[in-house]
Amino acid sequence: GAGVSQSPRYKVAKRGQDVALRCDPISGHVSLFWYQQALGQGPEFLTYFQNEAQLDKSGLPSDRFFAERPEGSVSTLKIQRTQQEDSAVYLCASSPRTGGRPLGGYTFGSGTRLTVV
Amino acid sequence: GQQVMQIPQYQHVQEGEDFTTYCNSSTTLSNIQWYKQRPGGHPVFLIQLVKSGEVKKQKRLTFQFGEAKKNSSLHITATQTTDVGTYFCAGGYSTLTFGKGTMLLVSP
């Protein structure tokens, strides 16, 4: 597609509910990143995929957070047993770079705003 | 871990005034990137700097990368209302660490 597509745009979840957030990166982009952005803050790194391989998941805040990219394109971020502190915008970004070389910027999607009530 | 700090957190200027935001890293950076996020929007890539002492310009925007590759700045000349938003710097190799951003408000 022309850009990074995320769905849903908005999600309201009751505390304890499981949620799944989808990211469809730019076609052919090898690298995919998930970030969490709280109100008034900068994006905080969650996890990074190169193709289907999850190369870095050091930013996932707890074992309730899980991400996958099984076929190297679409990715899903799953949050189990949501808590109020999980409320944030979840941003997905993709990049065409390979091999860890820092070439070019990220293209971000519009994000999913998650509100846990 | 790597930390990226930005100052100021917030700046309010009159249209036509200049604006500068500064970015400092706790470690030497392989590259620095700048993003702009409009209110209610998502970060949009502006530029990447790679070389020590590098200076790049985009119309009224001037970006600098420090000689030691630990700091950077973004300068906007003669701000316009369309410049409103939050400007983030980000550094890293395989993944980016973002600063908290500088929110720019421009009054007409």
Image (cartoon, helix red, strand yellow):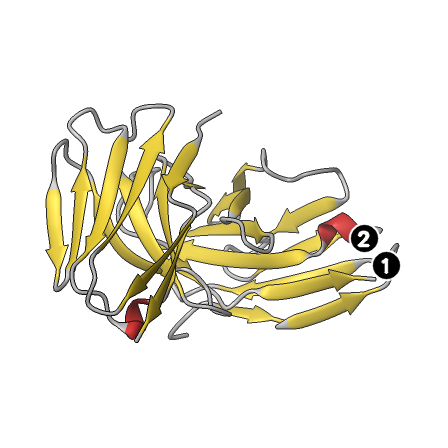
Tell me where residue A98 appears, x and y as whole percent: 33, 44
Where the C terminus of chain B falls, by quadrant? bottom left
The earlier-in-sequence mark between 1 and 2 is 1
Name the secondary structure under disc 1.
loop
Q: Looking at the rendered structure, which numbered label has been put on residue B57?
A: none
Instruction: Name the residue: 43% across, 47% down.
Output: B9
- At x 50%, y 68%, the residue is A110
Image vertical order of residue B68 relative to residue A10, above or below: above
Q: Give the residue displayed 15% in from the left and 27% down from the top.
A: B67
The answer to whether residue B30 is seen in the rendering is no
> B72 or A27, which lies in front?
B72
In the image, taking residue A88 as reference, residue B86 lies left or right, namely left
The amino acid type of the residue labelled 2 equals Thr
Q: CA distance from mark 1 to mark 2?
A: 6 Å
Does the CB distance between marks 1 and 2 fall below 8 Å?
yes
Neighbor class of circle 2 (other Cα within 10 Å; few <14, some 14-19, many 20+) is many
* Residue bearing the label numbered 1: A17
Specify the label residue A82 is tagged with. 2
Q: Residue B55 or A26: which is nearer the viewer? A: B55
